[in-house]
Image (tube, rainbow, N blue to C red):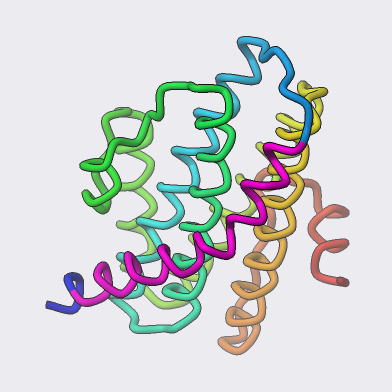
Amino acid sequence: MKKVIAFAVLNFLSIVLFAGNLTVDKQVNSLPYETLSASEVEGIMQMREEEKLARDVYLELYKTWDLPVFYNIAQSEQTHMDAVKTLIEKYNLKDPITDEDFENIGVFKNEELQNLFNELLSLGEKSLSDALKVGATIEDLDIFDLEELLKSTDNEDIKFIYNNLMKGSENHMRSFIKNLDKLGKTYTPQFISLERFREILKF
C-alpha cells in the first residue's frame, strides 16, 4: 500500500513540478537547434535512463527506511528525467522510457541497468548507512558521467541541461553526506576525484 501511495503522490508532484519545468522547456527551445552527433544522442539516452535508475532506487529505499531524504531526492530525480525529456522531444528522438517503463519502478529493459539496480538495492537494504552510501554512490557516478558528457558536446541546450543536472546531483550528494555524518559514517568517492568531492562538500 505504501508503494502505491508513494507512487501516486510522486505522479502528482511530477505534474506540479513539470509545470515549473515549463521554464526549462522554454529555455531549451529558445537555444539554437543544432545537429546532434551520435555520442550526443547516446549521452541523452544514457542520462534519461540513469535518472530513472536513481529515482527508482530512492523510492525503494524510502519504502525500506522511511527516511524523507530518499523520497525528496526521488522527486528531484523525476524533474531531472523531465528535463532530459525536453531534449528528446526537441530533437524528436525515441524515448528509451515508455509510459509503461515510467510506472514500472525498478524494472529496466537494459540488462546492465537492471543488474545495477538490483545490486544497489540489495546493498541499500542491509543498513541505513549502507542505503545512504548507495545514494552517495549514485550521485558520485552521475556527476562523473555528466562531466564526461559535457566534454563531448558543444550544443548549448545539452550543456544547459547537463549543468543543471550537475547542480542537482551536487545538492543530493551533500544531503546524503550530511545524513551519513549524523550516523558517524563517511563516504569515499569511487568515481569523481577526492578533490572534486571536497569541493562539493565545501559549497
Q: Of 29 and 139, which appears nearest the observer?
A: 29
The boundaries of the magenta stretch are: 5-30
Residue 28, compared with residue 59, is above or below; it is above
- Point out residue 137 in the picture as x, y percentages from the top left corner: 57, 55
Q: Looking at the image, which residue sits at the far left? A: 1
13 drawn magenta:
yes
- Number of callouts: 0
Residue at position x 35%, y 36% in the image: 97
Q: Is residue 170 left or right of residue 10?
A: right
Q: Residue at x 38, y 29 (%)?
A: 96
* Front residue of this view, candidates 125 and 88: 88
Percent coordinates x, y for residue 151 in the rendering: 81, 27
Q: Name the spot of residue 123 as percent of width and height, x first.
A: 37, 59
Q: Is residue 55 left or right of residue 142?
A: left
Residue 169 in the image: above or below residue 202: above
Instruction: Residue at 35% x, 46% y: name it.
Output: 117
Q: Tell me where residue 156 sits by quadrant.
A: top right
Name the image quarter holding the C terminus: bottom right
Residue 36 point in image, percent of width and height: 67, 15
Against 4, residue 105 (above or below) is above
**Residue in view at x 26 percent, y 30 percent:** 109
User: Where is the N terminus found, in terms of image quarters?
Assistant: bottom left
Magenta span contains residue 78: no
